[in-house]
Amino acid sequence: MPRCGYVDALDVERIRHEIISRGYSIVDNAVDKGAIGEMRAYWIDRFRSSSSPQPVIWGPYYGEENRIIHDHSPTHTMYRAYDFLWNDPMHTITREIGLSLSRMRNRIAEHDERAGEFLQTDRYGIYITTSYYPAGSGWLEQHQDEAAPGERHWHFILPMTFRETDYADGGLFLIDRNGDKIDVDLNMKPGSVVFFDGTCPHGVDRIQPLSNSTVGRLQMFAIPAYLELPHEHDRILENVSVSRYLKARLRKVRNRFRATHS
């Protein structure tokens, strides 16, 4: 198949049919293996060298800074990098491939190809996220994504580490439309991408380490979200100190006084 950048042209009709009929479609040889190797090396080093303990961000706001966090909670243990499109890319190749696969996903779902890249009045957008599930502890509980009425909330996931090469067991699973649990990672290899309906139950079984490797599970995908406004977002409001709040209130009073006496 012809390649456009790092991503091959895919059989959109076949993938769409498989998602509609069974909930997912695995496509082999979709992404350049050399690029995946470069991404893998960059992110494994980056996660090991720079991250901060913070809760996973499920509801981003417009204007957030890029960040790398790690979080251990009753529902998951993971590292996650957030690459928001209004910021400079955290890693150029990762963003380029993420946007290419997002456009492909949009075509498969019969959406506008660049949906989510440019904010509209509904503030729907996408951001590129790279997630790392460490060997021995990484996991994500089974969950279902909510879709807007009448919308296809479909995802893609590009793995950069692999079962039996980097970790022994565990990984992405999905409950298909027949109610069967599909061991997705068992069927993935370098260059593979899985497209799936996010409203199907899915999660990540705990990553079991190999005896000769400390590498866990590494993946990338573009998350669609409705972005909040900064002044309405609880995480910003929680970080506003009493002194900063009082200064802001006094500034408004001072400006009002100046306006009435000018």
Image: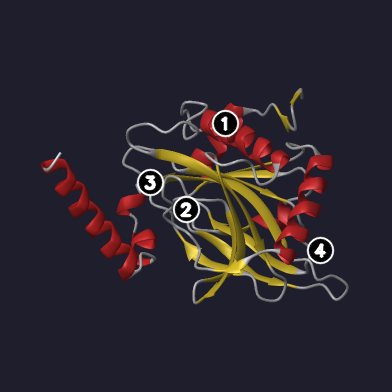
Q: CA distance from mark 4 to mark 2?
A: 26 Å
Which labelled disc corresponds to residue 200?
2
Amino acid on which the number 1 mark rests in the picture: Arg
Q: Which mark is residue 114?
A: none
Q: Position of residue 3 (x, y in %)?
A: 76, 25
Is residue 142 shown above or below 103?
below
Please give left or right for residue 114 compared with residue 255 in the image: right
Is the residue under label 2 in contact with that under label 3 (CB below 8 Å)?
Answer: no
Q: How is the image coloured?
A: secondary structure
Residue 62 horizontal/vertical position (percent): 42, 45
Which one is closest to the eye, mark 3 or mark 4?
3
Number of other residues with Cα within 10 Å of mark 3, as a class: few under 14, some 14 to 19, many 20 or more: few
Callout 1 secondary element: helix
Discs 1/2, front: 1
Tag 4 residue: 164
Q: Earlier in the sequence, mark 1 or mark 3?
A: 1
Question: For the image shown, how many numbered marks are present on the structure?
Answer: 4
Task: Residue at 80% x, 71% y: name it.
Answer: 214
Q: CA distance from mark 1 to mark 2?
A: 21 Å
Whether residue 193 sits left or right of residue 191 in the image: it is left
> Which of the marked residues, 4 or 2, is nearer the chain's N terminus?
4
The residue tagged 3 is 147
Tags 4 and 2 touching, CB below 8 Å: no
Label 2: element kind:
loop
